[in-house]
Structure formats: C-alpha cells, structure tokens
Amino acid sequence: MNAQPSKKNPDAGVPLPFWLSGFTRIRKAALTFAATAGLAIAAVALSYWYKQDAQDVEGRAQRARNDAHSRLTYAETEKEEIRRFQPAFLELQRKGLAGEERRLDWVESIRQIQEQRRLLPLTYQIDPQQPYRLEQPLPTGDYQLRGSRMKLHMDLLHEMDLFNFLADLRQRGYFAVQECSLRRTATATPGVQSPALTGDCTLNWLTLTPQPAAPSAPQPGSAKRPAFAVLGSAATAAGSTP
C-alpha cells in the first residue's frame, strides 16, 4: 500500500515582510511616539486656545480702558464747561431766557419802567407762546427756542421815550423786535401833556425750554452737553438779538 504525499500549506513557506516581522521589536517605541505626538498636538491646540482667550481678555480690557478714558475726558470737559458757562447760565435764568415763560414778570417790568420813566399810558397784548426761529440759526441742543409775541402801543412825548423804554426792558429779559413804527399825532394842545408821537411795536419774548425727546441709552464719549454749556453758548447769540 503506497503512502500518499501530504499536502503543503501554500502560505507556510512565504516569509513575512521585514517591517512586519520586526514590528514586535519597535511596537513599544511606536506606541510611545504616538502617545507623545497626541500629547504634543493637544498641547499645541490648548496653547492656541489659551492664546485666543488671552487676546479676547486683552481686547475687552482695552475697550473697557478706552470707555473709562472717554468717560473721564467727558467728565473733565463737562466740569470745565460748567465752570466756564455757569455765570452766563445763571444770568440767563435771572433774565428769564432759560426755563418757562415769565409772563407776570414781563407785565411787572413794563409797569415799573412806565412809572420810573413817567411815560404816557401804553397798552400791550401778549399772545400765547409758540416755537420761534431766528434769522440766523441758534445752536440750542435739546432745548427749543420759543417766543411770546407782544403787540405794544405807546403814546410818546418824543421818540426817546420809546428807545429808553426798550433799553430798560432789555435789562429785564430777552426779546426780539420784529417791527416798530412811529407816527406823528395832531398838534399838541398848549398847557396839556399830550402825545406828539405814537409808537407801535411787535416784540417776541424769547425763552429756551427743554423739548421732549425719545429716551436712549447714552453712549460713552457721545454724551450730551450739559445745560450750562448749551444755554451758556447761546447767551451771546440771544443777547445780541435786535
């Protein structure tokens, strides 16, 4: 009985590649390298994140510093404007330009001037207050310029009675003369104090009052000028109104 030859595994005699057969010897080093590389990548990513976070913190700190500097600058400017314009502002309040109209004060001023100057009888009518515009724009900020029109009729011995009356009245308040006219009357009666002229004028009593505005959150560095500065800077323009 003949013995049959055994079958050989075709892969039994195929040698493994060198790098695969030697991997077992470098496996520990390869794992160490992979772990080290992973840690290095994680460290780089973490350092980048910390850098970005530090830059964000620095940016916020810089913005806060700039805002604080803007507020400080505005506070110093406001303080200087208050010191500069406060006397003018108080003068405006005294003469009635700043605030609500002072109709009773105007009436009392007219009565006092008439008595002091010993003027002939005069009549006047003050209309309700309305927004008023000057020929040249007047910077008033958040305030509105308003005028109360007064029609004045005076009997005059001479034209200086009218000029003196307006000069005295200007010391008591702010107004704009819209128009004036003088006319001669009939021949005066001898021995009787009768008018030689009649004067008719239209005046506008001026006041600056806060105007309503929609509330808004103040922005650093763009705060509104204080009333001292707004009204104080308007004093010259209003005071020079003809």
Image (cartoon, rainbow, N blue to C red):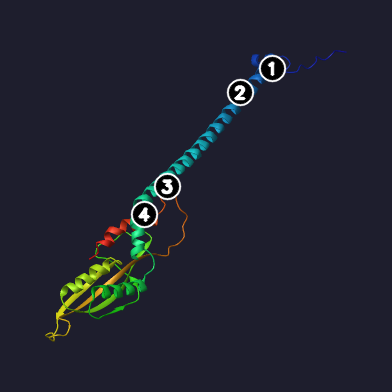
Q: Which residue is mark 2?
A: 37
Q: Residues within 10 Å of mark 2 (few under 14, many from 20)?
A: few
What's under tag 3, amino acid-wise? Ala
Residue 157 lies in quadrant: bottom left
Tell me the distance, in whole angstroms, between the alpha carbons under discs 1 and 3: 69 Å
Which residue is identified by label 4? 86
Q: Determine the residue positioned at 34% across, 53% down.
A: 85
Mark toward the start of the polypeptide (3 vs 2): 2
Q: Secondary structure at mark 2?
A: helix
Query: Alpha-carbon distance for marks 4 and 2?
Result: 72 Å
Residue plotted at (30% across, 75% down): 111
**Real-space CA distance between mark 1 and mark 2, rounded to the nearest whole angstrom:** 14 Å
Frontmost of labels 3 and 2 is 3
Is 142 situated left or right of 4 in this image?
A: left
Quick one: 62 or 94, which is closer to the camera? 94
79 or 105: nearer the viewer: 105
Going by the numbered disc 2, the residue's amino acid type is: Ala
Q: Which mark is residue 75?
A: 3
The image position of residue 99, as x and y in percent, is: 38, 65
Cα distance, mark 1 to mark 4? 85 Å
Graded by Cα atoms within 10 Å as few (under 14), some (14 to 19) or many (20 or more), the crowding at tag 3 reads some
* Mark earlier in primary sequence (4, 2): 2
Give the number of callouts. Answer: 4
Residue at 40% x, 45% y is 76
Depth order, front residue of 35/155 = 155
Report which residue position mark 1 lands on.
28
For the residues carrying marks 1 and 2, which lies nearer the camera in this image?
A: 2
Amino acid marked by disc 1: Lys
Q: Is residue 24 above or below residue 63?
A: above
- Asked where in the image residue 26 lies, by quadrant, the reply is top right
Left or right of 207? Residue 23 is right
Point out the image quarter for the C terminus.
bottom left
